[in-house]
Image: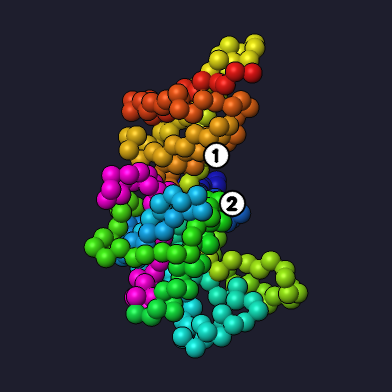
Amino acid sequence: MTTTDGSLLSTEMNNEEALYEQLLLQAAKEMQNQLPMAQESKQIRPQPGFCVKTKTKTNEKVFINVCKSDQIPPPPDLSEEGLVSLLESDDPSGYRIPMSLGEPHAEIDNSGNGCTAYDIVINSKFYNKIQNNKLFMEFFLTIGFEGLENKYNLELSREWRMLKNRKFLGSVTEQNIRTKSKPVIQELESSTSSPGTCTEPLVSEIASTCVEPEYTIVAEPADEHPSFLVAEISLPKVESAGSLLLDLGEDRIVLWARPDLYHLDIYIPFNIVQEKSGSQFNRKTRVLTITMPVQPA
């Protein structure tokens, strides 16, 4: 008569279950390694530094808030002699300054007039360096201006004045920067381009997490030349209209939701009457509605 040891069978089953769980865990890890890395971001709250006043080519006032944060990486160390050599070289694009270029925000100047302000955030140590060296200050502001011009399609005057009694125009807001989507500092291969070829900009911008919101545009009436257009823009992360900056062109809608939440820049198929257009933000539904009368055909 053959007998079966129940304890031995139980041990064998436990070993099989443990092996099965181990294989499952290993397979899960392998699948996770094959998935694309999720983009991670973090919020930074920069410290005010100084404010620079300049203007656009159309004589509109522009204020640039230069801020500092330890969360922004510093540029490679460079002496004043090295900077002079860099500026005298044919291709200075090998040296980049990491910075975060904030979106424009509407403000009021000391005279009570409307103006536009931009925030630039740089590394705290590099900020101290430009404060103590006029050449580095001029160099930084030059490429900072170029960075804003390239990103926001501006033309800024190179004549600027630093405000004496004001470190920041407006209120300091947090900025979102990506941490793992791509390296903050990108190394470039040595350039073999000939003179006159476009080179990479000196600005190494910290990428933001700003996204285009969902929107719909309805024409009334829909079956003929419309009398007006109604745009509805969904902004689920926006809590109040105070964080919105809306600019209506003759055939264009540009919307910013700060800090680095949404950006919408679209052209519309009809010319609108800008001065008679209106907008309303519903805090309950988080939807911005823009009503735009259309110019006659």
Residue type at mark 1: give it.
Asp
Mark 2 or 1: in front is 1
**Residue 241 pos. (x, y %):** 34, 34
Q: How many discs mark residues in the rendered view?
A: 2
Q: Is residue 281 above or below residue 227?
A: below
**Observer-nearest residue: 183 or 262?**
262
Q: Residue at x 56, y 56 (%)?
A: 150
Secondary element under disc 1, as helix, strand or loop, is: strand
**Residue 226 pos. (x, y %):** 59, 15
Q: Residues within 10 Å of mark 2 (few under 14, many from 20)?
A: few
Disc with the residue nearer the chain's start (2 vs 1): 2
Q: Is residue 48 above or below residue 283?
A: below
For the record, the magenta segment spans 104-131
**Observer-nearest residue: 8 or 147?**
147
Q: Residue 20: in sight, yes or no?
A: no
Of the 4 image quadrants, the one containing the C terminus is: top right
Question: What residue is shown with label 1?
Answer: 265
Q: Is residue 129 above or below residue 270?
A: below
Residue type at mark 2: give it.
Leu
Q: Residue at x 27, y 50 (%)?
A: 110
Secondary element under disc 2, as helix, strand or loop, is: loop
Question: What residue is shown with label 2?
Answer: 35
